[in-house]
Image (spheres, helix red, strand yellow):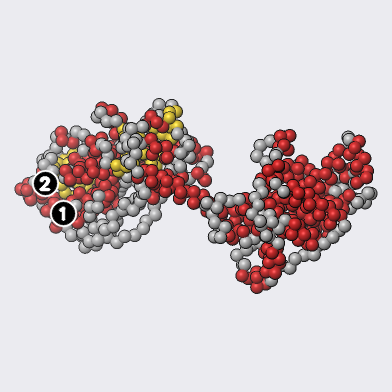
């Protein structure tokens, strides 16, 4: 075979991004191939031709990787090819060209270029499909006679005249046909890629722009090697016809097949990678189109919420109701709906606390429903995730999706970009007409429960205007009998250093005894330290140091503080002019430190707080302010004493989970009031 000129060194340098340069040509050869391409606008549906071609080749070489979708039977060969106009004529001409030129052992490159000229008016996809189809016709006739000559007298007579009995020498020729099989497999793979690239929808991808333009730049080269490979395969098969007793394949012939198979496989690898980029580009375009459509739909006034819900779930319009029965989505039509959005790491505490609010809606006479929308990565889904998904479904007492991929990708994109979902669960409220009342109602639900219904941003704003910073706001939903506690003062404290906890509780009880007052102490744990808190809670109860909350209350307390902060931030409140936000951030700052902390209060609403080191040293030096406490009262005296305790050095941290940009831009130190420096902390808490 007369080989075309390969790329020069300078060309290789300019194309150093290409991994497989051994199949590329220099500029002159590229231009020669392109010059044969003069399409006249005719459109040939090559898909049915390629399908029949693959069937032919698969029957010839059973172990070749040419499987179709579904089982191949007689009906597959009934494909109607009448709609391809003059392509049958071109197919016949290629068959003749291959039979004539290859039987005489002509120059393979010249034959390849002759076929290019013959197919000048066809698309690149049609060129390769018609050429490989012509090869399938010739190869099929050859193999059909070889197979039938032992059982069909006509085939036997034709075989005697045309070709030897190949089957009798199949073992001798096994290596040859294995190499041929690999090359044919690679040829079909590349042909499929070329057809796919030339038939990509222009609506979503332009032939003049990457990644399609990059792929199309090598289509002509790939087409050349497919046609050239067909010529080589035909020539070698034709040479078998002339054999009678000497069934030997020369080393050069075997090497030629192997070399071409490697070259064509490399081309397939390259085109396949480009095709993947094209499909990613198309998927992204389709995603953006669907995203824009959903955005328009959800922002356009609707008659009811059904269209919004249908857009969220796409083709999956069945849900599981609270009884785990499958129901059609229209059961939620014209109802207030909360979209509970989370990943699979939503905590069981969160589910249990939300369940309390959800079940209370009935006694409150409220008509709203919750749907769980799990946001998952479809590409990494496995049995472990499926088990986790099913477990979460089983413990939720509201509507859930019936399948983890029920939510449309464009909707997930909208949820992330417009509603700010990152990691922490959110609850988007839709009114009966599908209007979004609030992008995250969980904060309202934690703070005020069902009294905040219909969970709108306006309702949230009105609540904050009416609610002062009181202990009831902080723990009223956790300690419902707080107003009836038979004590003059109370204390909520936290931390995970048992030595400090024991010292603080003991010293505080000593102060209470000295003043002859009752102080109800409650240990509220620490955020994101479940196992340590559980162990400490057990020790506190064992040593009878104070009351201590269980897991759900501990989780709810800290989540409530974060919810207050996010709610305030959502409404644009800045710390300088918002007392509640100042207090919340102070307490969150205490928890983020390594030490403990305490908040004291009285029934009249007086409160005083301090970090662990400061409050413990104050309690230990009670003899210094005991007289003042008996004169002023415990809380006022404690406040005065704490104000006088100056810590010349302190290191204060405030750790907040990031979620959709809702972190306040400016934060003051809980100790000195100066602006804190913003840093990034990535945390993975196994507890």
Residue 378 coordinates in the image, percent (x, y): 50, 44
Looking at the image, is 386 positioned above or below residue 572?
above
Secondary element under disc 2, as helix, strand or loop, is helix
Residue 455 visible (yes or no): yes
Dot 1 crowding, Cα within 10 Å, few <14, some 14–19, many 20+: some
Q: Residue at x 73, y 45 (%)?
A: 53
Number of numbered discs on residues: 2
Tell me the tag on residue 642.
Answer: 1
In the rendered view, does 85 fall on the left or right side of 491?
Answer: right
The quadrant of the picture occupied by the C terminus is: top left
Choose between 30 and 484: the one closer to the eye.
30
Q: Residue 479's quadrant in the figure?
A: top left
Looking at the image, is 173 positioned above or below residue 322?
below
Choose between 206 and 644: the one closer to the eye.
206
Residue 588 coordinates in the image, percent (x, y): 27, 50
Q: Residue at x 35, y 47 (%)?
A: 419
The residue identified by callout 2 is 634
In the rendered view, does 231 fall on the left or right side of 673?
Answer: right
Choose between 625 and 211: the one closer to the eye.
211
The quadrant of the picture occupied by the N terminus is: bottom right
Q: Residue at x 26, y 51 (%)?
A: 569
Residue 658 coordinates in the image, percent (x, y): 35, 52
Pointer 2 or 1: first along the chain: 2
């Amino acid at each position: 075979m007369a080989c075309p000129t390969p790329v020069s060194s300078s060309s290789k340098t300019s194309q150093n991004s290409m991994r497989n340069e051994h199949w590329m040509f220099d500029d002159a050869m590229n231009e020669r191939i392109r010059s044969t391409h003069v399409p006249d606008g005719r459109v040939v549906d090559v898909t049915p031709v390629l399908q029949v071609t693959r069937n032919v080749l698969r029957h010839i070489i059973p172990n070749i990787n040419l499987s179709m979708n579904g089982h191949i039977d007689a009906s597959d060969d009934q494909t109607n090819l009448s709609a391809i106009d003059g392509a049958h004529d071109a197919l016949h001409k290629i068959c003749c060209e291959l039979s004539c030129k290859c039987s005489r052992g002509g120059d393979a490159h010249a034959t390849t270029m002759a076929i290019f000229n013959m197919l000048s008016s066809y698309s690149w996809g049609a060129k390769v499909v018609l050429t490989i189809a012509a090869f399938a016709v010739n190869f099929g006739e050859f193999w059909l006679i070889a197979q039938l000559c032992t059982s069909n007298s006509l085939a036997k007579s034709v075989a005697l005249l045309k070709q030897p009995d190949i089957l009798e020498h199949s073992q001798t020729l096994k290596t040859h046909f294995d190499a041929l099989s690999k090359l044919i497999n690679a040829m079909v793979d590349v042909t499929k890629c070329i057809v796919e690239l030339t038939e990509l929808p222009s609506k979503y991808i332009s032939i003049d722009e990457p990644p399609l333009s990059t792929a199309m730049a090598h289509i002509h080269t790939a087409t050349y090697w497919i046609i050239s490979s067909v010529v080589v395969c035909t020539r070698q098969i034709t040479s078998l016809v002339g054999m009678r007793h000497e069934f030997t394949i020369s080393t050069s012939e075997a090497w030629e097949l192997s070399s071409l198979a490697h070259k064509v496989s490399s081309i397939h690898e390259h085109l396949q990678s480009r095709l993947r980029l094209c499909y990613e580009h198309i998927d992204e375009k389709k995603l953006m189109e669907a995203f824009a459509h959903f955005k328009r739909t959800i922002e356009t006034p609707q008659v009811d919420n059904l269209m919004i819900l249908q857009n969220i779930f796409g083709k999956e319009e069945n849900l599981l109701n609270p009884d785990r029965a499958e129901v059609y989505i229209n059961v939620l039509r014209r109802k207030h709906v909360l979209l509970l959005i989370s990943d699979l790491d939503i905590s069981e505490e969160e589910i249990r606390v939300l369940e309390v609010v959800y079940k209370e809606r009935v006694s409150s006479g409220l008509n709203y429903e919750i749907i769980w929308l799990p946001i998952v990565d479809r590409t990494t889904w496995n049995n472990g995730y499926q088990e986790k998904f099913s477990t979460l479904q089983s413990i939720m007492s509201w509507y859930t999706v019936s399948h983890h991929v029920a939510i449309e990708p464009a909707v997930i994109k909208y949820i992330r970009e417009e509603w700010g979902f990152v990691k922490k669960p959110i609850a988007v409220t839709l009114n009966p007409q599908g209007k979004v009342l609030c992008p995250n109602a969980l904060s309202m639900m934690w703070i005020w429960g069902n009294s905040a219904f219909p969970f709108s941003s306006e309702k949230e704003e009105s609540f904050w205007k009416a609610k002062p910073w009181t202990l009831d706001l902080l723990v009223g939903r956790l300690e419902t009998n707080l107003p009836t506690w038979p004590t003059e003062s109370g204390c909520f404290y936290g931390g995970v250093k048992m030595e400090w906890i024991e010292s603080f509780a003991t010293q505080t009880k000593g102060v209470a005894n000295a003043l002859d007052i009752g102080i109800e102490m409650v240990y509220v744990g620490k955020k994101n330290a479940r196992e340590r808190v559980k162990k400490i809670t057990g020790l506190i109860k064992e040593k009878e140091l104070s009351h201590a909350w269980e897991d759900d209350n501990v989780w709810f307390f800290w989540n409530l503080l974060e919810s207050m902060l996010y709610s305030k931030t959502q409404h644009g409140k800045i710390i300088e002019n918002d007392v509640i936000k100042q207090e919340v951030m102070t307490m969150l700052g205490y928890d983020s430190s390594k030490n403990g902390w305490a908040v004291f209060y009285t029934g009249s609403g007086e409160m005083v707080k301090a970090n662990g080191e400061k409050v413990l040293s104050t309690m230990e030096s009670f003899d210094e302010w005991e007289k003042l406490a008996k004169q002023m009262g415990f809380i006022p005296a404690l406040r005065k004493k704490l104000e006088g305790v100056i810590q010349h050095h302190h290191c204060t941290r405030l750790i907040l989970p990031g979620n959709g940009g809702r972190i306040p831009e400016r934060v003051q130190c809980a100790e000195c009031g100066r602006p804190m420096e913003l840093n990034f902390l990535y945390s993975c808490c196994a507890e």
